[in-house]
Structures are given as C-alpha cells and as structure tokens.
Image: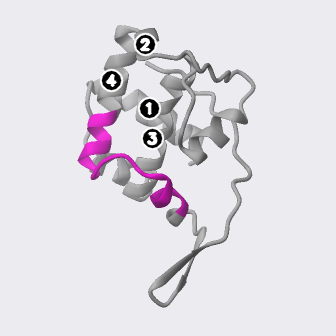
Amino acid sequence: MLKRERQAYILHQVNLHNKVLSSSLSDEINVSEDTIRRDLRLLRNLIYARHGRPFKSELLRAYFDAVEWYKSDEQYTDVRLTAVDRRNINLIRSLEDQLGGPLTDYDNKKEDGLFEERGEEKIHDCMIVGFHSMRTKIL
C-alpha cells in the first residue's frame, strides 16, 4: 500500500469511528507502528500547513516546501484553525499518543535508515530528498 493510500485509509477510519486503535491500524494495513506514527505526523501537520504555519522541523519544512500549494506565513497563529481542524488535530494526536507520542525528526530519520551505527556512536550522514506531495482530503 502506498503512503498516500495508507494516509487516506487512516483518515477514513478516524472519520468513520471518531477514534481508531493504532495497533489495529498497523495490523490492518500490515505496516509498523512507526510507519503509522510517521503518517500521523504528516497528516496532523498537513492541517497546519494548509493555513500557512511555518515549520521548525527540518523534515516537515522540506516536505511542505516541496508541495506547490504550501505558502509559509510568518504571521501564522492557531486562531486560523477551524473547529473541524482542531477536532482532526486532537483525533490524530490521540492516535499518536497511543503509540508513544508524535514521531520526532530523529525517529523519522532513524526509521529511514539515515543513521549509520558505529559502536556506541550514531553518525548522521544524510540529505533530505525525494519528498512527494500529499493529496489527502482532511475530514
């Protein structure tokens, strides 16, 4: 299943049930819980991106800068979020919390294999490339 299809499926399940057990999502679409966490992080931040929120996260900034519709706005505040946006953010965040909290940039890069193990030391030797636009309809 492609990332876009997974994310659409996750949104569909959340919309259908108003909550979903993240472990069942992982089993249903046969991916790791970290993959679900990554998708949830992007979906949650997609809501903010649609309103122009600038991102501090290197990965999120690279991801959303690569989509043509995203325009970062330094004047952004959460006041721009609608009630539906807030509901969706809270639902997605509750799923992330079931899995131990939102995935961090470090966790995301580690899962992508962008860290090389050398004894006790981890060496970061990567560049962020190949992000694709996500065309998922929010609830």
Q: Report which quarter residue 19 is drawn in.
A: top left
Amino acid of disc 1: Arg
Sequence-earlier tag: 4 or 1: 4
Sequence-earlier tag: 3 or 2: 3
Pointer 2 residue: 81
Q: CA distance from mark 4 to mark 2?
A: 22 Å
Q: Report which quarter residue 73 is drawn in.
A: top right
Outermost residue, front direction?
75
User: On screen, 135 above or below 124?
Assistant: above
Q: Which residues are magenta?
A: 93-109
Q: Nearer the viewer, residue 56 or 135?
A: 56
**101 drawn magenta:** yes
Check whether the beta carbons of the residues at disc 4 and disc 1 lie within 8 A of each other: no
Pointer 1 residue: 44
Pointer 4 residue: 16
Q: CA distance from mark 4 to mark 1?
A: 17 Å
Amino acid of disc 2: Leu
Check whether the beta carbons of the residues at disc 2 and disc 1 lie within 8 A of each other: no
Check whether the beta carbons of the residues at disc 1 and disc 3 lie within 8 A of each other: yes
Q: Residue at x 68, y 65 (%)?
A: 126
Q: Report which quarter residue 109 is drawn in.
A: bottom right
